[in-house]
Amino acid sequence: MLETYFSAPKTLRRLRGGISGPHIDAFADDLEREGYALSSSVRYIRAASHLGCFVQRKGSVLKEIDLTMLDSFCSHLRRCRCPHFKRGRISYHAQFGVKLFHHHLVGRGICPSESVPTLATHPPLVIAFCDWFRTHRGVKEPTLRHYARGATDLLRALGEDVSKWNAQAVRDFLLQRARHCGPRTTQALITSLRAFLRFLNFCGEFRDDLALAIPAVAHWRLARLPHCLSMEEVDRLIAACNGTDPRRLRDRAILLMLARLGLRAGDVACLRLTDIDWNNGTLQVTGKGRYQVRLPLPQDVGNALLRYLECRRANLATDHVFIRSIAPFRPFASGDGVSSVVKHALKRANIDTPAKGALCCATQQLRRCCGMACPWIRQALSSVTAALI
Ligand SMILES: [Zn+2]
């Protein structure tokens, strides 16, 4: 209901007019359902109405709104002279608001959805490669998309007749690509090419394993060795999440899970309430390749989890343990959200490290814990390591 956000009859009439008007009430309902703050929703609704005016002035209709149109709307914001709409410092909210409105229109079938690149657009051999890795290795879609990109580039460069490929051609392709991209991209390309070449070798396409032609990752990493946190830095990082507000309690629980259990960011993001066995003090983790392992839940991690769960939002339609701290209140879409928690904590703790993701925190702890004399934890962690690496 638009009346939740606006009371002046003139404003209500104006917002319900124009081409976005017929959808504005449903959009307001969506915003309320997703838990956006009142002040943010007011801005997003104004932005939706503003977009309607902009589209109408261009002589277009709602169904023609696409990402290009949203871009030109954002450029318009800088020089906007439309009556009733303010420009300047609120344009960030306007930009986000129109994205949300577009998403709402796509969901209602008013606008066509933006085409998301799918694996189906790749050559049949690459699709077969992805199917094999999905079935036999349990590789997830984001990784497969990245594998498919590298494999398709190699196929296009070296030709579809893979039986004619040789080690020199593969190496030349890699060196040529490495000249134009940074070390991280090169490393990602190496991983996908290795996987693809091993698959082809497994299928009997080559006499020799061409994956061996790919230089070792370490060779490409010489310029920038990974930096891990010291034990003192990890303690400072966790201390940076002291506090009683729900966000700090969540961040503290996340950091302790990464630090004490050596979990990957993706494992933490996927964790469900049913994965925690409070009676036996254990935690079930599904690692890479759908490998499942049950880990003992250390006392401090359990305490931090309990404190967070006591203030976690109720009435959520999900049993994921960790939820975003801003609207929409949903689980993290991937491990990136967890890595972002680490990144913010590093900033608060004033720790400067080139590797700002969750992994640097976890790897340090794995190394630290694997060196412990206690055999059961070493065994548990070595299982996790096998699943993670
Ligand atoms: Zn304008």
Image (tube, rainbow, N blue to C red):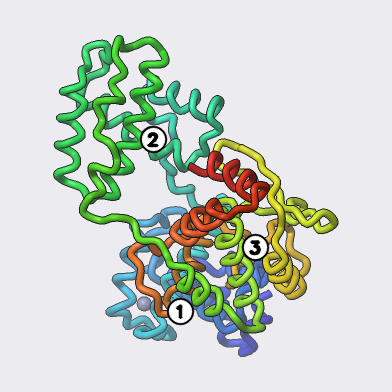
Q: Residue furthest front?
A: 373
The residue under label 1 is 349
Q: Nearer the viewer, mark 1 or mark 2?
A: 1
Graded by Cα atoms within 10 Å as few (under 14), some (14 to 19) or many (20 or more), the crowding at tag 2 reads many
Q: Is label 1 in a helix, a strand or a loop? A: loop
Q: Residues within 10 Å of mark 3 (few under 14, many from 20)?
A: many
Q: Tell me what residue is drawn at x 63 percent, y 71 percent.
A: 250
Earlier residue among tags 3 and 1: 3
User: Is any atom of residue 25 visible in this view?
Assistant: no
Of residues 76 and 117, the one drawn nearer to the viewer in this rendering: 117
Residue denoted by label 2: 147
Rate crowding at label 1 as few (under 14), some (14 to 19) or many (20 or more) other CA atoms within 10 Å.
some
Rendering coords of residue 356 (x, y %)? 40, 64
Whether the residue carrying mark 1 lies under 8 Å from ligand 1 is answered with no
Q: CA distance from mark 3 to mark 1?
A: 22 Å
State the residue lying farthest toward the bottom.
8
Residue 201 position by quadrant: top left
Q: CA distance from mark 1 to mark 2?
A: 36 Å
Check disc 2 and give the amino acid type. Tyr
**Earlier-in-chain disc, 1 versus 2:** 2
Seen at 35% across and 34% down, the residue is 192
> In the image, what residue occupies the spot 31% across and 29% down?
152
Which residue is denoted by mark 3 in the rendering? 322
- Image x and y of residue 251, in percent: 58, 71
In the rendered image, residue 108, in percent from the top left (x then y), is placed at 59, 53
161 vs 76: above or below: above
Q: Is residue 92 left or right of residue 365?
A: left
